[in-house]
Amino acid sequence: MAKPRSLYVCNECGAESAQYFGKCPFCASWNSLIEQVIAPTAANSAKIGVGAAARATKRTKTSDRNEPHPLAALTLPEISDHAQARLSSGYGELDRVLGGGIVPGSLVLIGGDPGIGKSTLLLQVANQLASHYRVLYVCAEESGQQVKLRAQRLGIRGQRLAGGESAAKHLASQSLTPSTLYLLPEIDLETILAELEALRPPVAVIDSIQALYFASLNSAPGSVSQVRECTSALMQLAKREHITLFIVGHVTKEGAIAGPKVLEHMVDTVLYFEGDRYASHRLLRSVKNRFGATNELGVFQMVDQGLEQVQNPSELFLGSRDEENPGTATIVACEGTRPLVVELQALVSPTSYPSPRRTATGIEYNRLLQILAVLEKRVGIPLSKLDAYVASSGGLNVAEPAADLGVAIAVAASFRDRVVDSGVVLIGEVGLGGQVRPVSQMELRLKEAAKLGFKRAIVPASQANYPGVGLEVIPVGRVVDAIAIALVSTKKNE
Ligand SMILES: Nc1ncnc2c1ncn2[C@@H]1O[C@H](COP(=O)(O)OP(=O)(O)OP(=O)(O)O)[C@@H](O)[C@H]1O
Ligand SMILES: [Mg+2]
Ligand SMILES: [Zn+2]
């Protein structure tokens, strides 16, 4: 048996080298190389990536000159096309983000900050799916009792097996219950693989990939090599047995899924579950999807009984509107194909600092600076001695140019202490010359605003022609004109 050898793996990019470097030679990040001792046991070399090598040897043997190698490559018509219908997760918001439901046999990675509700979401989804399918939930981070506690809070009771048999007995009797939720508190990869093979669930959840442990690798759970090997082993099994896998992945402080980028490359779909911990809404976003469009958005709300779908997010983000408040403007942001009506608030007040403060919550800081400069230079609002604070309601991230006009109007309204006409939405990008520029998906935005009862929309001059959207479309060429139209002439307390 070969000696154990050391390998250095970069935590950032996953590159391997036989030698230690302070700076990764591949991605140039510092102190990212982690030592990993590989003990080449038989089981180990059989499992890890030797498949290809073995196949290659086999090919050399058969590719004897006299004995032609039988072709394994297929033409498209040779591949069976019994397209499996997508499964519904029971949550329309999740199905939307996945591109119209769960693709059988796909690998879905769900990342998110600690405590954001990943386990809650997946337990609820697993429970929904378990009314039609066998589902295995691997809780590698929590004990069975902890998961049961959560389940009780969420009102999930689970199914009792017929005759009160234990799961093992049930299996032995060869009559797998078609629809049940099974829990497996386990971190050992091999045990999990064996269980998956025995149970053959159409859907399984791994919570989380960073907690799994592959004993043949002498590195700690959560290290790059562990995460990579565990994912790859799970992927091979899932593809072979047509198991749909939901994998929870932790997020680093930079906001990427912990472990190298290779993890995101391996899976079919990458979703991020995010939201402000102090606000109740949670957003599910797809950043990669082999089976659907990305940038789709699912909206949930965390309540005492767990996560609830939010069918009409605009109502959530519009919140309780304070129509009498100077400095409030309403915009229509777009997340993927999903329009969201969001309220922006601005406050400008004399500064007590040598240089004024600017704060942006939910909108892009640099865009705010740019809009303030445009207001100063092109509209003549002197802001250089004023602090400016701009926030979106609920802290929702609306970092897109279409929000510019709303930001400009909100700031102008706060400066002039006027209210913005409460029946008006503002849609448009602001150029450096003070002009209002066109934005994408205008019709979608206008319809959403009309649906919520807005009467007028101030839009870029070139995007005036939308008859039949259900509200009055007012085209403007310049920010100055928009300010003149949007601000109600009477002051708040007059
Ligand atoms: N008793 C409760 N009542 C209401 N909400 C609760 C309660 N217990 C937990 N929560 C909510 O559930 C969240 C935790 O959810 P969950 O454990 O699913 O998160 P997670 O993303 O899996 O976290 P981790 O990264 O630690 O695994 C809490 O942040 C809180 O918002
Ligand atoms: Mg969790
Ligand atoms: Zn690197």
Image: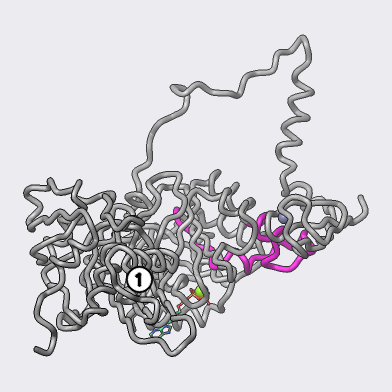
Is 376 one of the magenta-colored residues?
no
Residue tagged 1:
396
Residue at 9% from the left image edge and 89% from the top image edge: 494
- Residue 226 in the figure: left or right of residue 131: right
Location of residue 15 in the rendering, given as x and y in whole percent from the top left corner: 74, 51
Q: Is residue 447 visible?
A: yes
Q: Nearer the viewer, residue 264 or 458?
A: 458
Picture quarter with ligand 3: bottom right
Q: Residue at left 70%, top 54%?
A: 14
Left or right? Give the position of 492 relative to 200: left
Q: Please state the horizontal and vertical placement of residue 241, each as a whole percent of the image.
A: 52, 46
Residue farthest to the top, as pictured: 66
Callout 1 crowding tier (Cα within 10 Å): few <14, some 14–19, many ≥20: many
Q: Where is residue 77 drawn, in percent x and y? A: 44, 22
Say whether residue 154 is visible: no
Compared with residue 395, is residue 216 higher up or lower down, i.e. above or below?
above
Compared across the picture, whether 101 is left or right of 37 comes to: left
The residue drawn where x is 77% and y is 59% is: 216
Q: Quadrant of residue 376?
A: bottom left
Q: Position of residue 136 (x, y in %)?
A: 49, 63
Numbered range of the magenta stretch? 202-230
